[in-house]
Image: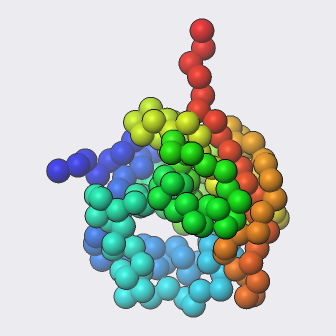
Amino acid sequence: MQSPILVEEDKLVIRRMRDSQDDYELMVRWRNSSHVRHWWDPDDPPLSVAAATDEYQPDTAPTAPTTLCIVELRGAPVGFMQFYRWSSYAAEADEVGIPFDDLAWGVDVFIGERDALGHGLGTRMMELLCGYLETERGASSVVLTTELDNFAAIRCYQKAGFVQGARVLDTDTRDGERVWCWVMTRMKRRPPL
């Protein structure tokens, strides 16, 4: 059986999301909080435990194309991350205009606990997960999208080594309209000579 912990460093742990009521209830609380809901699927109705189970349970399987993760700081859950090979979602990547190859990975992230915002946690989460993807999964790059006016996320990603690229029309919607996003890419870091 696979360890639920993917990577940990200095009291920050990224673990696999469990097929459990506790993790689904956590997602409901976080996804329905205003600071997450504003950026994460804002057109969706409020999330219920049944809807969270339907949405997330398939991806808790070890063979799922997307790996769901809960981030814990000092043993307390603080955020959510998911990662996937862009080649597993090639149609969406092509529709949006996200450049990818077989070694390009995608990441989505949010900090669920409001009091954890503004302390550099997002940057630490991204650095830790990207390092894991590069060393353990062979990622040549990590590519994500973020809304044009999500300035806190943009700064976080830049601090974690992402470079802002093209402006694209994402498949996510706000008020029924697709949203404009930046494509941001972090290339695999090469060890110093």
Coloration mode: rainbow
Name the quarter where the C terminus is drawn.
top right
Residue shown at the point (50%, 85%) measured from the top left = 47
Q: Residue sitting at 47 percent across and 41 percent down?
A: 133
**Residue pictured at 51% horizontal, 45% vertical:** 102
152 and 118: which is toward the camera: 152
In the image, residue 159 sits, relative to residue 167, either above or below, namely: above
The quarter holding residue 112 reads: bottom right
In the image, residue 152 sits, relative to residue 54, either above or below, namely: above
- Compared to 100, does 117 lie above or below? below
**Left/right of residue 67 with respect to residue 99 in the rendered view:** left
The foreground one among 90 and 62 is 90
Number of numbered discs visible in the structure rendering: 0
Residue 40 visible? The answer is: yes
Specify the farthest residue to the bottom. 45
Q: Where is residue 19 in the image (x, y as percent from the top left)?
A: 28, 70
The quarter of the picture where residue 22 lies is bottom left
| Image: 128 above or below 89 | above
174 on left or right of 136: right
Write the residue at 57% across / 90% down: 45
Q: Residue 71: x and y, percent?
A: 45, 55
Question: Residue 111: x and y, percent?
Answer: 57, 61
Q: Is residue 76 left or right of residue 180?
A: left
Q: In the figure, is residue 47 to the left or right of 162?
A: left
* Residue at the extreme left: 1
Residue 171 in the image: state x and y as whole percent: 67, 73
Q: Is residue 22 visible?
A: no
